[in-house]
Amino acid sequence: MAQRRKENIPNIWDHPLEASMAHLKKFSKDSYHLIMKCTKPDLKEFKKLAMATSIGFLLMGFIGFFIRLIHIPINNIIRGSS
């Protein structure tokens, strides 16, 4: 594994502005490296992700529907159907 050099970030209590700027610089640098490593998914990977997402949406929808379906009669029993 590649060794990363430890960046010299000042103490937040001694130098708050310099420490904040150092954290922002480190965050922006790491974000830039992450974006440069990301790749666009190919068609096969996109179809797999779309299928998994749609199955998740359908599953959550059915769960919510059945919970609501069970909740309505219980709610009518508790409140009374006047």
Image (cartoon, grey):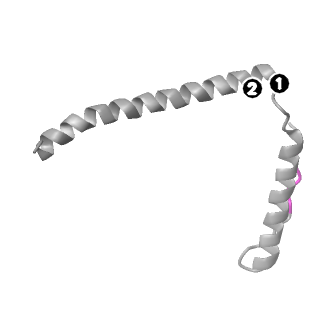
- Is 44 or 16 nearer to us in this picture? 44
Residue 37, quarter of picture: top right
- Label 2 sits on a secondary structure element that is helix
Q: Name the quadrant of the N terminus.
A: top right
Density class for disc 2 (Cα within 10 Å; few <14, some 14-19, many ≥20) is: few
Give me the residue at 87% from left, 55% from top: 29
Tally the numbered discs: 2
Residue annotated with mark 2? 46
Q: Is residue 59 visible?
A: yes
Q: Are marks 1 and 2 in contact (CB under 8 Å)?
A: yes
Instruction: Report the magenta residues as a range.
Output: 3-7
Q: Which residue is mark 1?
A: 42
SS for callout 1: loop
Regarding residue 10, the answer to whether it shows in the image is no
User: Compared to 4, does 70 lie above or below?
Assistant: above
Residue 70 horizontal/vertical position (percent):
27, 32
Q: Image height check: is 22 above or below 34?
A: below
Asked which quadrant contains residue 17, the reply is: bottom right
